[in-house]
Image (cartoon, rainbow, N blue to C red):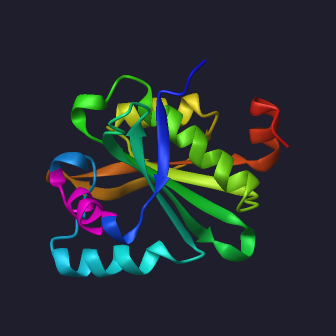
Amino acid sequence: MNARITLSPVTPDDIDFITDLESNASLWPFEDMLPTDKEAVRKTVAERIHSDWHRQFLIRLATPEATPVGEVHIHWYIKERESWELGYSLFAEYRGQGYCTEAAQLALKLAFKECKAHKVVAMCNEYNTSSIKVLDRLGMVREGVFREEIHWNNQWVNQYFYAILDREYQAITGIR
């Protein structure tokens, strides 16, 4: 099967694009605290590019135009425990087509193979059914519920906590 998407590491040329993406409320409808200071976001994005604790990628269509359709990232969750956190965002017009799942699969492979993660975690708003489906498709396990963790839409809602261990990833993918 031919790849439908590719991941390209975020570079200094992508800082403005990622800054706009990370501060665009329409791309993060289930988040409670979105940054509003674009200069601070820009500075953070620039600092992360060459870090060893954060890996961020543009999700691009595998076409000659290589259209960016979103981003996926992994970063240390608890370094001493060799755990990383997975996150992603996709432009609305590309949702529901499997691109996010494919990008997250590539990010998991990177986390376990290159970063030598023992565990990868992800969290999402209980109402974010699309993200829940992605995490389930990845083989991640819902380990817990942070009750009323997020103040969203003028109410307190739960946040789901997912994880997958290196041995579970290996069992699902056959990749060692």
Q: Is residue 32 left or right of residue 165?
A: left
For residue 175, say whether it is visible. yes
Residue 94 % position (x, y): 29, 30
The vertical placement of 80 against 105, above or below, is below
Q: Quadrant for residue 142, please give it.
A: top right
Q: Is residue 112 left or right of residue 87?
A: right
Residue 164 % position (x, y): 68, 45
Residue 51 % position (x, y): 54, 78
Look at the image and tell me in which quarter the C terminus lies: top right
- Residue drawn at x 60%, y 75% as measured from the top left: 52
Q: Is residue 45 left or right of residue 56?
A: left
- Residue drawn at x 22%, y 70% as measured from the top left: 35
Q: Total label count?
A: 0
Q: Which residues are magenta?
A: 14-25
The vertical placement of 6 against 52, above or below, is above
- Residue drawn at x 42%, y 53% as measured from the top left: 147
Q: Main secondary structure of the magenta part?
A: helix
The vertical placement of 26 against 172, above or below, is below
Look at the image and tell me in which quarter the N terminus lies: top right
Residue 26 % position (x, y): 16, 47
The vertical placement of 81 against 108, above or below, is below
Does 19 appear in magenta?
yes
Which of the pair 47/30 is nearer the observer?
47
Outermost front residue: 64
Does 167 appear in magenta?
no
